[in-house]
Amino acid sequence: QEGTKIPSKRQQDTSITSELLYKDLLKSEQENWNNISARYKAMTKRIKEKLEELHNKYTFNSGSPRIRFGENVYFEENGCIFLSKADDVDEGNADILFSTEDLGFSDAFIQRIRISPDQGHMAISLKSENSEEATCVIMKLGHFPVVEKVIPGVFSFEWATNDVLYYTSQKNLKCQNVFMTTLTNQKHTELVYTEQDARFFVDIYCTKDRRFLTINSNSKTTSEVWLVDCRHPFKLPALVQARTKGLIYHIEHRNDELYILTTYGEPAEYKLMKAPVASSGMENWQLVYVLEKKTKLVDLEMFSDHCIMFLKNSGHLYLNVISFVSHSVQSLKLPTWACEFELESHPEHTTSTCYFQLTSPVHPPKRFAYSFKENNLIEQAVQEVPIITNCHTTRLLAKSKDETLVPITVFHNMNSKELRRKPLLVHVYGAYGIDLNMSFKEEKLMLIEEGWILAYCHVRGGGELGLSWHKDGCQSNKLKGLHDLKACIVLLHKLGFSQPKYTALSAASAGGVLAGALCNTDPELIRAMVLQAPFVDVLSTMMKTHLPLTIEEQEEWGNPLADEKCMKYIKSYCPYQNIKTQCYPSVFITAYENDQRIPLTGVLRYVQKLRKAALDHASRTSKRGNWIPNIILDIQANGSHCDSSWEDSLNE
């Protein structure tokens, strides 16, 4: 039949040949890495010991976010979940509810915890290093907690009632089905929602007052929400507003009104609107609050009489507290060193305090509480260890090719003399409207202590200055992100932060596009580049629609199959396509054999081509003292594209 043609003998032979070639390449890269890594044994040992020391010194004060229920606090430490009394959070006095080791999940880490409203059940998701898919374990709590159900391949889940759980299933990086499972005497599971469009991804959220579960179906640019009434969990979900191309919205609930965080109307940045539950269509949406320009909304927390917006504006963090009683807005600027929020989940929306942690790449998480009654910020001093105070945080603006000002956050040791002679590590991402990750990492603190300068370039394509900042750096605007990155590095050098021969560039995943592109256009600006699971073969990846993410990624990179102009544009910046015979910086790449997001074949092709170009250049210009860059690929058999446990990231 048409469409199920049997491949010809020749096609089969070609595919076998390329498979063998791939295996040979993989083997030779692994041998090459084993030979090279031996040189670094002593240095690796020293760094590992230093990182362990920092980790032990700073982890106890941060702890993981806590889940509060009246008198009870649930928290996670070292793969175990504990329950203790609110005024006595300490492993020693806590009951252990769950341990990954005891239940045979020793290689997994806990990703998400949800406690049922009556605290009778607990659902946990566990993820192992080598898979993107998590397993959901449902425990019956009591004197002796027992495992009641295990569901593989789960992405998100929430309790609708004490014994009804809604969850989404994940397969091949896609989430398109929502199920409901009951834990009553008549146990059953049924499918309640299916998403038909491959560009959309489904997850579940519970409103702060636990009145509704929301089934959220989002593409990169458009969303649609369905409501499950927690008082009637078996009723069919109700649609809030049918999807409209380009309209993003998220739902909260308070006093029979839906609070809608949305891009509806002009400008296309987030606004807070509201509408009655019974007539929730967008013709009934009323404006509550508009964000200022160039402001990034990081998170929103709803309480019975207030709502708190967690905001970023040119690198600074703010809280905006909206009172629904006095209809006023208070704005609070947070400490200048802070770069990232981590919210603590607090199921009780009637509380008068909001807890969160602040962190930066070089500052371990520090707990804060905002009190509505007092209208003030309270620092929760837990740590005995003094937090590093000799690190200086500077915020700069670089003027890009089109005059746009691009924020840079710089960290360096205050005691450093002659910054021009210090090594500089530049970080970039610039895709999907996602901010550069600026949460605490032991290795960043170690570098500061050893005299390095760290710079974070918040280029277009990321989300640091709101939704338009992303729009201005995606699809046919991708090159703007490259111009931004170049402007940032040039400004840093001009202001005396290091110089090209001491500068390294670091990027992960989609950040590899801009880093790899800069390496082709301006290799003289940097001496080394470090990439983790990098996206370097954009064109051929976006031509392969059988890969799990290609269709939904078209909203970020464009569709080269349908649009020749788009194909030419991608070709103009794609790192693999633009490698040329010239002097390159040294490059170190970590990639993962089983990475579902970034196919290893593209990384292998990139490394081969880059090496050849660098060697060709060296042989053509064989002057004395000519420098041949190191181009090293470390392929990890385990691990995956996403966050890994502390032990694995330490080894890496």
Image (cartoon, rainbow, N blue to C red):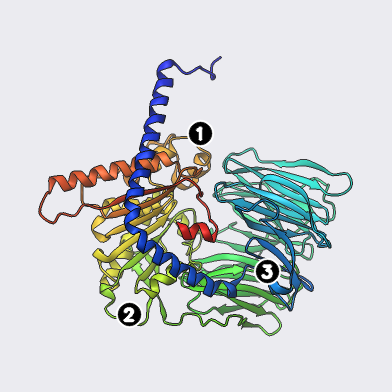
Residue 106 shows in the view: yes
Alpha-carbon neighbours of circle 2 within 10 Å: few (<14), some, or many (≥20)? some
* Residue at which label 2 appears: 416
Q: Is residue 607 left or right of residue 178?
A: left
- Mark 1 or 3, closer to the camera: 3
Residue that appears at 36% across and 32% down: 21
Look at mark 3 in the image and give the residue it sits on. Answer: 66
Q: Nearer the viewer, residue 615 or 160?
A: 615
Q: Position of residue 164 (x, y in %)?
A: 81, 51
Give the amino acid at mark 1.
Answer: His
> Identity of the amino acid at label 2?
Ser
Mark 3 element type:
loop
State the residue in front, 567 or 70: 70
Q: Secondary structure at mark 1?
A: loop
Residue occupying image coordinates x 29% and y 64%: 503
First in sequence: mark 3 or mark 2? Answer: 3
- Residue contact at pointers 1 and 3, CB within 8 angstroms: no
Badge 3 amino acid: Arg
- Residue 286 showing in the rendered view: no
Label 1, label 2: how far apart the Cα atoms are: 52 Å
